[in-house]
Every structure is written in C-alpha cells, then in structure tokens.
Image: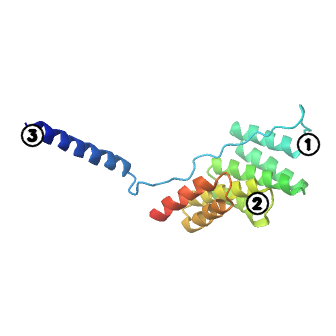
Amino acid sequence: SRTPWYIAAAAAVLLMIGSWGLLQLDGSGQGVEPIGQIELDYYRSSGNSVDPKSDEAVIREAIILANRGEHLQAVDLLEQELESTSDSHARSLLYLNAGSILYNNSSYAEAANRFRQIVDEEIGDLLVQERAWWYLGNTYFQLNRMDEALQSFRRAYELNGAYSRVAESYLKALAAE
C-alpha cells in the first residue's frame, strides 16, 4: 500500500530536479545577453508635414535607408546633419540614431563612439542620456568589455528612469557570473 506513495514521491522529486535543471542551463540561472537589435524610432511631428530640411526629416530618412539595408548611407546622412546643427537635443538624437544603426549593423566600436558623444557631452534630455547609457552598456557587452558595460549599466540604473529596472537586472546577473 505504500508503494504508490513512494512512486509518486519519487516522481515529484524527479520532476523538481528536472525543472531546476532546466532553469540552470545557462550556468547561473540569471544569464543575460546583450540586446540583439535596437529598435529605430520613427519620429512624429506635431503637424501633418515636416520640413524636409529639419533634423526630424533627416532622422526619418536615415531610418528608412537603414531599414532598406543602406546602413552606411543612413549614417552618412546623420553625420552630415550633425555638422550643420548646433541644437543639443537634435545632436543627441542624431548621435543616438547613428549609434543605433551602427549597432544593428554589428559595427559596435563605431556605435560606442556615437553613444559616448551623448554621455560625455551630456547632451539631450534625461531620457536620451539614459538610453545612451543603456545602449552603450549593451555595446560594450557585445565587445566583451565587461567593466565598461557594468559601468554603463550602472549609470543607466542610477538615472532611475525607463531603463533602470532592466539595467538593474543586468547588473545583478553579470555580478553573479
């Protein structure tokens, strides 16, 4: 009469061990990887039409080019616009998009340079700064420059905005490895 209970208990133990094993496949249970792609934002204007010479129009055109696979032309377009604008917010968005396009094209060292421009010059609003730190952390992670990745994730976390929770999870996971 005890045999069915022993079989049930043994099955439950095996099920728990199997479940735990599946959770541990990455070695730490908390393994993280750098993001694969950065979503390119389409910017909306307040009106129906956008001045074709505006920074916003240039960013839109660069995103269209990048989505067609014309990454170098997209980055060149953004770089040309950077030379002609002095508005700090516009410059931060141009750098952010250039870095994102380069990241998505696996040009991580070049992407890091664009994201560094934003954080080193402290241009743009707080959300742009936070995104730049988050993207920079992922870029360094891709380059296997883990100390710099951790520092960048920590800065994104400290800004306590939209990326703070995910940055915190990366900090915890990377600290456990």
Label 1 and label 2: CA atoms lie apart by: 23 Å
Mark 2 lies on a secondary structure that is helix
* Pick the front one: 72 or 12: 12
Q: Where residue 128 sits: x, y (%)?
A: 75, 54
Q: Which of the two discs, 3 and 2, sits closer to the camera?
A: 3
Residue at 35% across / 46% down in the picture? 22
Q: Is 79 above or below relative to 174?
A: above
Q: Which of the two discs, 3 and 1, sits closer to the camera?
A: 3
What label sits on residue 53 in the rendered view?
Answer: 1
In this view, the residue farthest toward the front is 1
Cβ–Cβ under 8 Å for marks 3 and 2: no
- Tell me if mark 3 has few (under 14), some (14-19) or many (20+) residues whose alpha carbon lies within 10 angstroms of its own: few
What label sits on residue 118 in the rendered view?
Answer: 2
Q: Is 57 above or below relative to 176?
A: above
Residue behind mark 3: 2
Q: Is 88 above or below relative to 120?
A: above
Q: Which amino acid type is shown beneath numbered disc 3?
A: Arg
Cβ–Cβ under 8 Å for marks 1 and 2: no
Left or right of residue 67: residue 84: right
Residue at 84% across / 52% down in the picture? 90
* Pick the front one: 3 or 34: 3
Q: Quadrant of the N terminus?
A: top left
Q: Which amino acid type is shown beneath numbered disc 2?
A: Ile
Q: In which quarter of the image is the C terminus?
A: bottom left
Mark 1 lies on a secondary structure that is loop
